[in-house]
Image (spheres, helix red, strand yellow):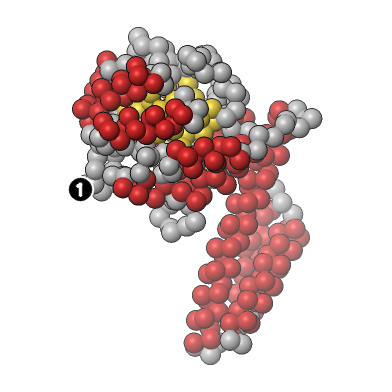
């Protein structure tokens, strides 16, 4: 892929030595809150401070950011504490205001990245500027859409780019606020190896207790850094309170991170192995979901006095799935063995329900 990329070259920051850490509150709420949080983070060694000035919300009525009023607060953080500052932009007016206020790093959020018109508007506003830009993944797991957004910003002359993996939205209630689907950013790395990838465990997990394990998983997968929401008083935060941690908790999480040495294999082979690992996790997650549905079917059969095994249904599954497997380059025998094992486990779980 023909992209013109340069190192982020952030002043005062060792260039992309893992883990680069960006931290700060979800939203800039008051000047006192911004400065207090920034001081605590600076004391922990954080060098890049993030805070949302404009906050896109799923539904109207919530706190949608303090707006331009908060930009001088970020300037104070930069001038008084020496921290680089970062905020989200979603349109040309945001870009112009943030750059005029001296914000050091801009990022484009997941909702904006899902709209090529909005990304192009931001790209047009960035022309002629030399500023690092971070691009979150779109809300849906569309790698081509993500890459398209990267290309639009790069074609505007922005060469200091990185991406943020913040997970993907789902209509279901799951363990995570946004599904990690690690294979998507791993495939992006395979396609654009020079592009740094930063993980956002706050938005993936949606709960502060998930930040540490998600951050470690990102490091194990070779991500280049982390962006984590940290607030001086998380429980009182005006937005996303559940996924923010105090600076001292953040310091503890970072202190416990294990940064592993590289293995003695080629980069391409290691990338493919990581894809296998993440896809295996996806398979197990899907099997868990299938078994949950199977147990619900078992409850229905019990309530309606039906036998567990429905022979015609079992034969239909094996025939259809075998044909699908052949069309996708797998042997009919292999697919049958897989679904026979799945069916056996489903029957076992339904029999347990019958005997309860």
Q: For residue 121, what is the image quadrant?
A: top left
Report the residue at 37% width, 34% height from top: 37
Give the residue furthest to the top: 128
Q: Is residue 237 left or right of residue 331?
A: left
Which residue lies at the image location 37% right of the left edge and 37% below the top edge? 25
Residue 73 % position (x, y): 28, 25
Q: Secondary structure at mark 1?
A: loop
Quick one: 88 or 300, which is closer to the camera? 88
User: Can you say whether 293 is above or below 240 in the image?
Assistant: below
Q: Residue at x 59, y 63 (%)?
A: 288
97 lies left or right of 163: left
Of all residues, the one furthest to the bottom in this rendering is 305
Residue under circle 1?
Answer: 61
**Number of marks in picture:** 1
Q: Could you tell me residue 251's position as x and y percent? A: 52, 37
Quarter of the view holding residue 344: bottom right
For the C terminus, give its image quadrant.
bottom right
Q: Quick one: 210 or 308, which is closer to the camera?
A: 210
Answer yes or no: is residue 122 visible. no
Residue at position x 32%, y 29% from top? 35
Q: Name the spot of residue 49 as percent of width and height, x first.
A: 41, 28
Q: Quadrant of residue 237?
A: top left
**Residue 262 appears left or right of 161:** right
């Amino acid at each position: 892929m023909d992209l013109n990329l340069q190192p982020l070259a952030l002043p005062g920051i060792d260039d992309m030595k893992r883990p680069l850490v960006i931290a700060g509150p979800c939203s800039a709420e008051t000047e006192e809150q911004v400065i207090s949080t920034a001081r605590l983070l600076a004391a922990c060694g954080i060098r890049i401070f993030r805070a949302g000035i404009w906050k896109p919300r799923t539904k109207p009525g919530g706190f949608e950011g303090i707006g331009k009023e908060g930009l001088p607060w970020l300037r104070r953080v930069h001038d008084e504490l020496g921290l680089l500052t970062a905020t989200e932009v979603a349109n040309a007016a945001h870009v112009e205001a943030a750059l005029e206020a001296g914000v050091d790093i801009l990022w484009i959020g997941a909702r904006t990245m899902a709209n090529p018109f909005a990304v192009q508007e931001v790209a047009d506003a960035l022309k002629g500027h030399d500023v690092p830009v971070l691009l979150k993944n779109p809300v849906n797991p569309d790698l081509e859409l993500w890459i398209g957004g990267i290309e639009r910003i790069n074609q505007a002359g922005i060469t200091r780019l990185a991406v943020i993996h913040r997970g993907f939205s789902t209509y279901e209630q799951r363990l995570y606020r946004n599904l990690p689907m690690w294979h998507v950013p791993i495939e992006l790395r395979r396609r654009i190896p020079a592009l740094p990838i930063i993980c956002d465990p706050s938005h993936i997990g949606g709960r502060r207790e998930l930040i540490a394990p998600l951050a470690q998983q990102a490091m194990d997968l070779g991500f280049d850094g982390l962006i984590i929401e940290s607030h001086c008083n998380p429980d009182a935060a005006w937005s996303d309170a559940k996924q923010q941690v105090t600076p001292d908790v953040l310091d503890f999480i970072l202190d416990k991170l294990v940064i592993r040495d590289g293995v003695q294999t080629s980069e391409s082979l290691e990338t493919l192995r990581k894809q296998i690992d993440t896809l295996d996790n996806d398979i197990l997650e899907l099997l868990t979901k299938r078994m949950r549905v199977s147990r619900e079917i078992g409850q229905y059969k019990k309530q309606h006095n039906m036998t567990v095994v429905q022979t015609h249904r079992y034969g239909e599954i094996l025939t259809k799935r075998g044909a699908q497997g052949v069309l996708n380059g797998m042997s009919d025998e292999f697919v049958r063995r897989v679904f026979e094992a799945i069916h056996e486990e489903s029957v076992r779980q339904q029999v347990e329900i019958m005997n309860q």
